[in-house]
Amino acid sequence: MRRRSIAALIATVVMASAVAVPAVAQDETVLRTARLSDGFNQCHPVNAQTGNQYQWWGTIFNWLVKVEADSRTVVPDLATSWATDDAQTYTFDLVQDASWSDGEPFTADDVVYSVQWYLDNPDAYQGFQPEWPKVASIEALDDYTVQMTLDAPNSRFLGNLAGIANVILPEHVLADATADNILDLPFALCDPDAVVGTGPYTLENYEPSQLVEVVANPDYFKGAPNIDRIIFKDFADPALAIAQLESGELDLVFRVPPDEEARVSNIPGLTLVPSENPGIVRIVVATEKSQWSDPKFRHAMSAAVNRNGIVDGLYQGNAKVLHNHPGFEVTDTSLSTYDPDKARALLEEIGYGGETFKILYDASLPENQASMPLIQSDLQAVGIPVELVPTPGTGDFVDKLFTYVDGEGRALGDEGFDVATATTPEYDGFMHIGGTEALHPDVSNTYYRAPNDAHPKWLSGYNSDAIQDLWAAGRATADAGEQATIYGELGDILYTDMPMVHLFVPNIANVASDCLGGEFDIHLSERESFMDVEAWEWTC
Amino acid sequence: MGAYFIRRIIIAIPVLIGLTVLSFFIISLTPGDPLLARMNPEALAQTAANPELLEKARERFGLNGPLPVQYWNWLTGVVQGDLGYSVSTRRPIIDEIGPRIWPSLSLMIAASMFAIAFGIPAGVIAAVKQYGRADYILSGVTIVLISTPSFVIGLLAIYIFGVNLGWLPVGELYTFGKEDDVIDRISHLILPGLVLGTFGAALIMRYTRASMLDSLGSDYITTAKSKGLSSRIIIIRHGLRNALIPIITVLAFLMPELIAGAVVTETVFNWPGLGQLSVIAANAGDPSLMMGIILIVGIAVIVASIIADFGYSVADPRIRYTKGS
C-alpha cells in the first residue's frame, strides 16, 4: 500500500512536470550565442572590461553613434545627426521618440548625465575608458540637442564614441550613484528589475559567469527586433560549446578555437564565418635598455623571424603577416622581410655582443603556445640567444609587465618607488597580443601615449614629441588627404624606429547557423556585431 | 549523544579558522596582481599604469596592508556575514557563491546516489560470486573507472550520449525555456551525475566487496546458515548490515572526493556550481573569491563528517557517543 502511494506520488509529479507551462511561447524565435573569450562582469561602464560585455550591451544599450560592419563607418544611433566645424565643438541632434525600457523618455539630460558623471568621477572607471575625458564642457541646448566642446580638436572623437564605455545611461535611475556606491547598485549588478536601457532588447535574466538572457523590446525606437529572445552563454571550456554546436543547442559562436575550425565547418546547418582580426601579435622591445636601443637591433630581429612560415605552418594560412602597426599602410617591407643573412649582417654592424634577450609571454594564450618556440628558434638561428619567460596566466604576466625598477632597484608598488627613474623593466621584450589597431592609425597611440604624467614612457619605453605631435595632428584634422600624409609619415617613423616587432595576427573563426539572416553580419571588430541586432532575422 | 555532536560543532570552528589561515597565506603566495589579471589589453593600456587608481582599488578589495591585517579584516567580515567582493567580477562574493550552492549540492547528491546504487550492489554481487565471472567483470570495470580521468569520461559521455545519440542534453543546468521542468532538470543531471559518481561507485564497490567478504566469513553468518535462513536474509540483513560500517567511512571520505571531482566535472559540463566557480577564481587569480569558496567547502566537509558519525550510530546500535568519546 505504501509502495503504491509513493509510486502514485512520483507519477503525479512526473505528469505535472510534463505539462508544466514552458517559460517560452512555442513560436518564439530564440538565438543562442557564445563568445569563447572573456566573461560578463557588470552592467555599468565603470566596469567595462570584456568583449563579451560589449556584445550583449549592444542589445540593451545605445550609443550616440555606432559603427557599421567595417567597424569604421560611423552611423546614427541615439544621435540622428551631428555637426562640427572645427572637430572641437560637436552638436548632436538626438532621436525624439526613444524611451527607456521603464517607459521614461530619453532626452538630452541623459547624455549630459552620462558624460558629466564621468567628469565628476573619473577614477571610478576601472576598465575601458570612455571618450568623456576629452570633453571640456557639455550642455543640453534643448531636450533633444546636446553640444560638447572638447579640450582640443579631435576628428577621432566621433568614431571613438562607439566604444563600449560610452553607452548612454539613464539619469532617472542612476542620479544617486556615487563613485563609492556605484558597484553596489542593482543596476551595476545586472538586476533585471533595475537595468534600464534604450536598446532593442531588455535584460530578462542574468546569471553571473553563466548566461545573459535578453528579450525583444517591442517599443524600440528603430522598430521591434525580429528575433524574440537572445541567450548569451558563458563557457569555461570551449569543448562544450563546440559539442553544443554539434547537438544544435547553440546557433552562433564567436572565436572558435583554431583547432576546431575544420570540425565545425563540416557540421550541417552551420557556416564558418571567418573574420579579420583587427589586433596584433608582436614583440614589444624594452628600447630604453642600452643593448636594445639601436633600431638596427630591432630590424635584425624583424628580419630573423619567418612570419610566413608561422602563418602557413601553424595556422594553415588562416593568419595575416604584419610588418607594422596594422592601422598604417605599409608600402616598404624591406626591414621586416625574412632574411636571416641580413639579420646577421645587421647584428655584426652594430657590434652585438651576444647578450641574451629575455621574452616575457603569457603561456595561457593559444597564440603564444605554439609560436614562441618557433620565434625563439628563428632568433637564435641568427645569433640572438633567447630566454623565454612564460607566465602561467595573464595575472602573473601583467604583474611582471609592470615590474619596473627605479634607479634604486625598487619595483612598482614598493615604498618609495620613484617612477621618474623607473626605466628598466625585468624583461627585454614581451609578447603583446590583441587590441583593435587595424581600425584606425590613432588606436596605436594607446600603446605610446603616457597614461599620466607619472609614466612618460609606456610599454616599449619609446616615445617622442615627433610621434605624439603627428598623432595629435591626425586627430586635429578631418581632411582625408591631410590625414593620409600625417599617418603616412607617422607610419614610416614607427616602422623605421621599430620599437615593436610586428609578426602576424590569426584570423578569427566564427560559426553561425544557416537560419540567421536579415542583416546579420559579423563586424570587423566582432565584439561590436550586436550593434544592429534588431535587423537580424531567424529564417527557419 | 547530543553533547557529543555539540562538541563536534564547537571543535569545527578552530578547524575552519586553521583551514582559512593556511589557505589565505598559500593564496597570497600566488604570483600576479588580481586587479589586472582579467583586463583586456586595451583596457590595461588605458588604466592599469595609474598607481593611484590601483591603490584605491586595492583598498576597496582589502588587498592593501600586511597579510595578517588583511586576514583579520576578512575574518571579521565573515563573522558579520560579509564575504567581501570578488576582485575579478567586482560583485559581492555572496552573490557569486550563493546561486551555485544548490547546483553543486544537487550534483553531489546525484553522484552519491549513483555511487551507492551501483557500488553497494556491485560489491555485494562481487563478494557473493567471489572469483566468478561477475566478480571479474565488475572488478575490471571498477579498475577502468578508477583509472580513467573524469574529464575523459565526461567528454566521451557528452559525445556519445549527447551529440551522436542525442539521448541526453549536452551540459548545463536546464534547457532554455524549461527552467521549471523537473524532468528536463533531471535529464541534465544524469550525465554529470554519472561522471562525477564513477570514481565513488568504483571505490564503494571495492570496499563493499572487501567488507562483505570479511562479514560473510564471520561466525554469525555460519550460525544464520545453520538456522536455515534464506540466502537473501543472510546476505542483506546479516552480511551487508555488518559490512556497512567501513562503507560509511568511505562514504564520509567521498565528500571531499566529490568536491574535488566536481571541479573538473562542472567545467566539462558547464555546470554552474562551486567547482566551476573555483576554476574561474583560480584562472582569474581572485583571492577573495577563492577564500569564500574554501570557507563554504570546508563547512560542507565538516558537516559531512558529522553526518557520517551519526550514520555510524544508526548502522550499529552498539555505537553510542559518550562523554569520553
Image (cartoon, rainbow, N blue to C red):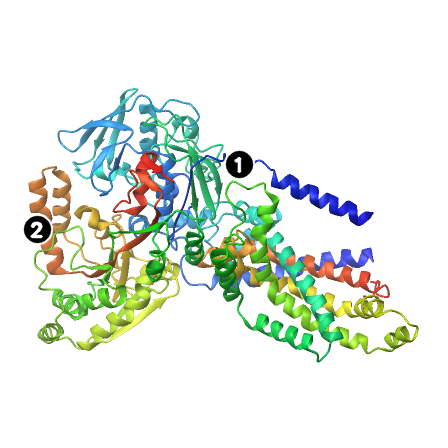
Depth check: B203 or A328 in front? Answer: B203
Element on which disc 1 rests: loop
Identify the mark at residue A23; answer none if there is no mark.
1
Query: Residues at marks 1 and 2, common chain?
Result: yes
Q: Residue at x 73, y 43 (%)?
A: A9
Identify the mark at residue A489; answer none if there is no mark.
2
Q: Is residue A532 visible?
A: yes
Name above or below for residue A238 compared with residue B207. above
| A186 lies left or right of A162 | right
Q: Residue at x 34, y 42 (%)?
A: A516
Query: Given this view, does label 1 or label 2 mark the residue nearer the observer?
Result: 1
Specify the subunit that label 2 lies on: A
Depth check: A427 or A201 in front? Answer: A201
Under mark 1, the amino acid is: Ala
Depth check: B213 or A42 in front? Answer: B213
Identify the mark at residue B228; answer none if there is no mark.
none
Q: For mark 2, does the 10 Å Cα neighbourhood hold few (<14), some (14 to 19), or many (20 or more) residues?
A: some
Q: Position of residue B216 (x, y in %)?
A: 81, 75
Name above or below for residue B171 compared with residue A385. above
Element on which disc 2 rests: helix
Compare marks 1 and 2 and give the one earlier in the sequence. Answer: 1
Q: Residue at x 12, y 58 (%)?
A: A495
Name above or below for residue A50 compared with residue A381. above
Q: CA distance from mark 1 to mark 2?
A: 59 Å
Q: Position of residue A392 (x, y in %)?
A: 39, 65
